[in-house]
Amino acid sequence: MESASQDINLNSPNKGLLSDAMTDVPVDSAAAARTAAPEGLTLAEEEELRSELAKVEEEIGTLRQVLAAKERHCGELKRKLGLTPLDGLKQNLSKSWHDVQVSNAYKKTQETLSQAGQKTSAALSNVGSVISRKLGDMRNSATFKSFEDRVGTIKSRVVGSRENSSDCLHSPLGAGEKPPQDNTPF
């Protein structure tokens, strides 16, 4: 046929298709599917199952239409209340986090980590005590006391020589003058 006779009804299942292109399409899909009947079923059982299948498919289509209408209505209500998609996302994240926190896996993990933290804290405390005791023992040892005495002697010589040499140094400033402050940034 010519394109002028093309079905332009937008609600038609044949919209935009030429009528002679439809001649090869089977009209009864159930009849076409009957050629491959499953084994072990009588014709009556097969017809009953096909009838039930058609009803279920029709119910699914109806439910999809109802769901779409409900979603549109929900969107309109949210728009009127001033709720944004971001608010919904925040609420979903909050609920998800709450669900995670009350889950058994989260609770067990939290308990395990708490126990591990307590054990680690106790171990570090013990290590600190051992190190303190060892340093105390080392400080009381004869070798450390000998080293400490030598460092003290060197320190007194250095500090003593600085005090003596500062008397010998002549300041470019006159008596009673203060040195200028250095206010340069770091």
Image (spheres, rainbow, N blue to C red):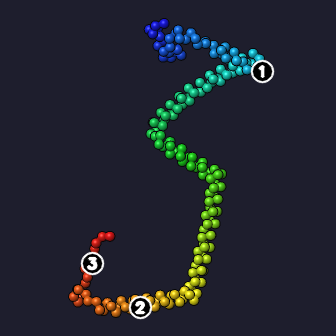
Task: Tell which of 155 and 99 is nearer to you.
Answer: 155
Q: Residue 66 lies in what quarter of the image? A: top right
Q: Earlier in the sequence, mark 1 or mark 3?
A: 1
Task: Tell which of 72 and 1 is nearer to you.
Answer: 1
Q: Which residue was labeled with disc 3?
A: 181
Q: Residue 185 lies in what quarter of the image? A: bottom left
Q: If the image is split into quadrants, where does the C terminus sit?
A: bottom left
Q: Amino acid at mark 3?
A: Gln
Q: Is residue 78 left or right of residue 104?
A: left
Among all residues in the image, which is located at the extreme left? 174
- In the rendered view, tell whether residue 101 sits above or below residue 146: above
Q: Residue at x 38, y 92 (%)?
A: 160
Give neighbour class at mark 2: few <14, some 14-19, many 20+ (Cα, 10 Å): few
Instruction: Find residue 114 and report its horizontal and vertical position in percent.
Output: 62, 61
Q: Earlier in the sequence, mark 1 or mark 2?
A: 1
- Mark 2 lies on a secondary structure that is helix
Q: Amino acid at mark 1?
A: Gly
Q: Which residue was labeled with disc 1?
A: 40
Q: Amino acid at mark 2?
A: Arg
Q: Which residue was labeled with disc 2?
A: 157
Instruction: Find residue 42 and report its horizontal and vertical position in percent.
Output: 77, 17
